Image: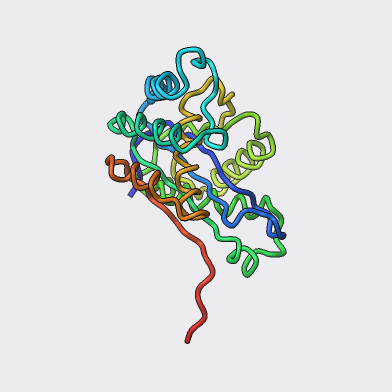
Amino acid sequence: MALPGDFLFLDESGDLGSAAGSTPVFAIGILHLDSRDALKRAIKRARRKSLGRSAQSNEMKWSQSSARVRMAVIGQIVREASQIAGVSACVIDKQWINRSFAKRREEVRYNYAVRFALEKGGLFAAGAKGRRIHLAIDARNRRATDTLTEYVELLMTNNELPCTVVVSSDDSARRPQLQAADFVIGSIYSAYAHGEWRYLNALRDGGIQVQLRILKKKAPAP
């Protein structure tokens, strides 16, 4: 079943490396919104309440925020839950990568994760036929932008996607929806990488539908 909402904002957390010192998981997700301007006020309120009026022009970033600020942003996002169609994401455990994709290029791993995030959002489903989807990504992540654009175009060329997906890049400092996506995907990453479930639980408890595909190494049979 396809998630409603034709304005999608993609972000990622963690890295795709498999060497020692890389992150334990890689998470990529899509925030599905009902309108292009949804959550604008939520991010503005979160910035004002958590950082003060003097910091209103600063970009809200998960990686640079304290636990208090993170929860404040999540709280404001939940407050506007009626504007959110849902969240679809893929989380890949590095042990799974080492077992299944150790010899594949990072772009292949990235595309694999993107496919599952799109799939959990229902974009491969028949119900998505005829829709025109706008998918935005942070312009500063140039490599990911190029990889995503190329992969989505390939999916449409091969008629694997029943809908039209238009990929665009935008400056996250000026696009509050990308900032919201950063916190939503950060919440998912924090849960599966560090066992910090309070942020993801707050999203779900607030009525936001989160569709996840988890790829992890299966435990050996006893």
Q: Residue furthest bottom?
A: 222
Residue drawn at the location 69% of the way across and 64% of the way down: 102
Residue 19 image point, x, y percent: 72, 59
- Compared to residue 108, the image places residue 169 above or below, namely above
Residue 17 image point, x, y percent: 68, 54
Residue drawn at the location 41% of the way across and 46% of the way down: 121
Residue drawn at the location 56% of the way across and 49% of the way down: 158
How many numbered marks have been drawn onto this rendered protein structure?
Answer: 0
**Left/right of residue 163 with respect to residue 136 in the rendered view:** left
Colour approach in the figure: rainbow
Q: Residue furthest top?
A: 54
**Left/right of residue 154 with respect to residue 83 in the rendered view:** right
Quadrant for residue 94, please give it.
Answer: bottom right
Residue 196 image point, x, y percent: 44, 51
Viewer-side residue, 26 vs 126 = 26
- Compared to residue 160, the image places residue 82 above or below, namely above
- Compared to residue 42, the image places residue 71 above or below, namely below
**Left/right of residue 18 with respect to residue 131 in the rendered view:** right
Residue 111 image point, x, y percent: 60, 50
- Compared to residue 68, the image places residue 94 above or below, namely below
- Does residue 164 appear in the picture of this structure? no
Residue drawn at the location 56% of the way across and 43% of the way down: 12
- Does residue 213 appear in the picture of this structure? yes
